[in-house]
Image (cartoon, coloured by chain):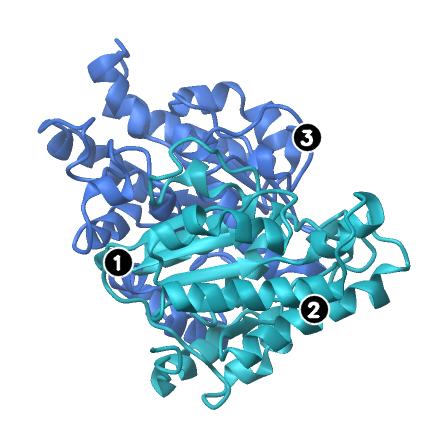
Chain colours: A blue, B cyan
Amino acid sequence: MDRRNFIRKSTIVGATALFLPEIVKAAMPESATVAGSEWHYLAKGETVLFQGDSITDSGRSRKDEDTPNHQKQLGGGYPLFTASHILANNPEKELKIYNRGISGNKVFQLAERWEKDCIALKPDVVSILIGVNDFWHTKTGGYTGTITTYIADYNKLIADTLKALPNVKIVILEPFIIQGGNALDNTWESGFAPYRDAAKKVAKDYDLSFVPLQSVFNEALKKAPAAYWGPDGVHPSFAGAQLIAQAWSTCIQ
Amino acid sequence: MDRRNFIRKSTIVGATALFLPEIVKAAMPESATVAGSEWHYLAKGETVLFQGDSITDSGRSRKDEDTPNHQKQLGGGYPLFTASHILANNPEKELKIYNRGISGNKVFQLAERWEKDCIALKPDVVSILIGVNDFWHTKTGGYTGTITTYIADYNKLIADTLKALPNVKIVILEPFIIQGGNALDNTWESGFAPYRDAAKKVAKDYDLSFVPLQSVFNEALKKAPAAYWGPDGVHPSFAGAQLIAQAWSTCIQ
């Protein structure tokens, strides 16, 4: 078991700290120091998988789903931007990158297709962004799951993943809202916070990388409104997607 | 007239040099030093326009062409990646970014639509990538223009642009081929070189920013083959498009 074996390279992280974009740096001050950073340096032949809901799906093509590094398969959001950084910066590593996000998914729906859409791909890195629908669909979709469901389902998903893939590196992306977005009402701030906390606790309990996207978007909102970063408050614009890619790259390169 | 008034900021360029991706740094060693860098720092409210052929077009939607910062309007290539960097890193500047590249265009076809697709937008920064069809279509499309036509047309386009927009910053992207691509035969290496030289001379003669994309892709090919960066040798993959975006960002941020 290798989860603790993230490479902590002071030189890499030190250099990274200098070029972290302003917003990401403000949101993730610990990334600017060696001590707090969990860093994975991609090795030759590794496979990276993006998993999640519509934010990850981002209009990806279902065709050619088994072809790695395929632009249409990666969609038009943060997986594409992140993948383009990874591939441009690691051409000699023969990496394979997939996106298997599906719009509307909640944790239990990831679990239902996890064997096919995660384990079977034998990923070395799995990036997961899930949670907004676990809350949202209780308000609009008749979903009866609660925060307790989310916590139990998410813990089981991670435990099952680590059992099947003992050496996998898992990156938990904090589910987030972009305050001021037109799909949000005033119940979101307090209602969604427990889901964010739960995702963070899962990362902590299993010693996984964690990307604090709520902090990133909170910093971003000091510079421009939700219309700029994600008009409905849930789905990032391509500027918002690039922010996610930048934040993600503080963990994995 | 303000073309010489590029801001040369040793601190910014110094920091930039540290985070330039490996390939771009190898291709553009002068960008790692203060002396050789022509740097434009985007100001509040500025408009950036991407112009060119299919590499720029990159499948963009013709709908909403007048809406700036519109993902589908920007397409799926280097203008999208570059725009996402610019917008993520400059949220307080209220920038407007457009893509008006059209597949198949040669210089004279840019000129035919320049009033509508450049001057009328009153851009502060115009990025131009043009030339591959000026050569290619002489081989496959029955086009009778020569290198002399390209030079004359390109010079006139720039002169006309500077006359209409005296303060515009123009960025010339070097037209390039990706050696080993399956649309290239052995006549390209010698046949296309004069077009690259001509684009560089235009940039020099008018004191414009110049991004040496042939050098960038030559460096990239030391790490991975054309199949990775642009299978047909003309149209970059999304990894290749990200390289262009990275190189572009050494001139403008």
The residues tagged by marks 1 and 3 sit, at their Cα atoms, a distance apart of: 35 Å
Q: Which three-letter amino acid code belongs to the residue tagged 3?
A: Asp
Q: Mark 1 points at which residue?
A: A27
Q: In the rendering, at what x and y percent does residue B240 appear? A: 63, 55
Q: Which residue is drawn at 68% across and 62% down?
A: B150
User: Badge 1 local density, few (<14 within 10 Å), some, or many (20+)?
Assistant: many
When the figure is inspected, residue A57 is found, relative to residue A11, above or below; the finding is above
Secondary structure of the residue carrying numbered label 1:
helix
Instruction: Pick whichever, B179 or B115, lies toward us.
Output: B115
- Residue lying at the far bottom in this picture: please name it: B35
Q: Mark 2 points at which residue?
A: B196
Secondary structure of the residue carrying numbered label 2:
helix
- Marked residue chain, label 3: A
Q: Mark 3 points at which residue?
A: A66
Instruction: Pick whichever, A17 or A164, lies toward us.
Output: A17
Q: Do discs 1 and 3 share a chain?
A: yes
When the figure is inspected, residue B9 is found, relative to residue B182, above or below; the finding is below
Q: Is residue B40 visible?
A: yes
